[in-house]
Image (cartoon, grey):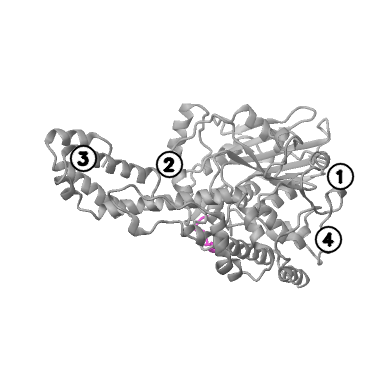
Amino acid sequence: MNCGKQQVDEEGAEQDAQLDQGGHVRSRLVSVNRCLPHAPEAVIYPPHSKLTDKEKTNICYLSFPDSNSGCLGDTQFCFRFRRSPGRKVSLCCFLDQLDRDLPVYLKKDPAYYYGYVYFRQVRDKSLKRGYFQKSLVLISKLPYVHLFRTMLKQIAPEYFEKSEAFLEAVCSDVDRWPSPIPGKILHLPIMGVIMKLRIPTYRDKPGTTPIVQNMPQADAQISMALPTVHEVDLFRCFCPVFFHIQMLWELVLLGEPLVVMAPSPSESSETVLALVSCISPLKYCSDFRPYFTIHDSEFKEYTTRTQAPPSVILGVTNPFFAKTLQHWPHIIRIGDIKLPGEVPKQVKVKKLKNLKTLDSKPGVYTSYKPYLNKDEEIVKQLQKGVQQKRPTEAQSVILRRYFLELTESFIIPLERYVASLMPLQKCISPWKSPPQLRQFSQDEFMKTLEKAGPQLTSGLKGDWIGLYRHFLKSPNFDGWFRSRQKEMTQKLEALHLEALCNENLVFWSQKHSEVETVDLVLKLKNKLLQADREQLPVKTDTLKKLRAHINDIILALPDDLQDILLKTGTT
């Protein structure tokens, strides 16, 4: 992570590219002070970092509770907001290469920023309103919730007691962080503490988390091993509504509009993040706002009654939303999230008309009828864990495994069918363009479910066909299929390159005219550029072999053509 330069103009885009090549993860620290009745004021670190006025306004208002939630003391939460349009984005940067090795649910979305907040509110009679209110916010494109939460917990309390020079020292530490390479054990120094962690890769088996061991330090620095960079305490978040977890999984899977009404930003943001993660390893492809306020720049867009609610998950705390969003089809009302000391009472799904204010009883307010029959086993298992005082971490592992198995049972039939759309390798000819994927047919897919459906891996009964039909119309299916389509198209391009390498291209060029040979060389060079630009899954030896073929063909041509072709593109 680099707290270094980023400009909004073209010069800034060049600096972005240089920083990316250096291998750091850019972020900014923003100190936001609120002195009522004045608007919040933000100071950005380092000072030469730039944000647009709209982005600054969003950060200022999202950095504080927007209701009388009584957040005395220190509170941590996170928010997510749109980047301003028109920003220059560096292409083919180092971060994009690292992004390709991440699981799909951890890939950054270039259209959004995350804000990780450490907020302090304490009584101070010397101030006009009687309270000291200040937030330290870390702005990043990366969804590494646990990492940045841990980092802020280390630096924010000390920052509130010290001068602004402390943040400059923090930025100096962060500038020395190594490249965030997925799969590697990283050692990140931050103000006398070494955080040790591992960023997952797409090659990791879903549901597994390699353990990062604490090692004794030779110097005086304290070592801290992070078990995860991105996961939240799943059971703690779902405990108030865990009788309905299966229905909530369906709502998230289908991209249904969903509101979480909570007493504080901490509860709202953690619950929204838990909901988004419950369909992992699928990526939630719609917008989600862990903490959403009336000051958000998308407030009018998301609360209008002139059109149906959008596919988005909102976390809110202001009582005003109970009236403004009462037309939304699915609302989760939660109270204070506490570690369960007793078995939660079963709460029935409530009708939306019963939700009048934010003071309504906790529960799920919806008229949605789940497609699948309720899985009583997971509820009993979690209830037993509460009775036996099983640690919440262990409860979260059980719940995460349940969601994972449910999602995999649902997605495996789709994966199997989409794989069948791939042309056979024997259809790939070096002298023709790569063949196209077959079109996705909903009817054809549905026919496969009878013998190769989710019943092979899940014992759950219900209307799986109806669930698939609904899913195929959702943003999550669209995002998933586009991603798989891209992967398979790149695989076809890679196989086409291998087919070219296995041909005697020099012999071919001797049998054809100079014009045809030059055309072949230019096409092969474009293939190499495409392989590099799109990071095609091609072996290094294949690329070396193709470069050798190109050079051999060029050297067999007349001198004047050799000079031209050697200067054209790269080999």
Q: Disc 4 to disc 2, how far (Cα)?
A: 53 Å
Which residue is located at x 57 percent, y 37 percent?
A: 168
Q: Disc 1 to disc 3, how far (Cα)?
A: 75 Å
Three-letter code for the amino acid on which mark 4 is drawn: Val
Q: How many marks?
A: 4
Q: Nearer the viewer, mark 3 or mark 2?
A: 3
Identify the mark at residue 22; answer none if there is no mark: 2
Q: Disc 4 to disc 1, how far (Cα)?
A: 18 Å
The image quarter in which residue 64 lies: top right
Three-letter code for the amino acid on which mark 1 is drawn: Thr
Q: Disc 3 to disc 4, how far (Cα)?
A: 74 Å
Q: How far from the left and from the top, in percent, is residue 449?
A: 58, 64
Q: Which residue is mark 1?
A: 357
Identify the mark at residue 516; answer none if there is no mark: 3
Three-letter code for the amino acid on which mark 3 is drawn: Glu
The mark that comes first in sequence, 3 or 2, is: 2
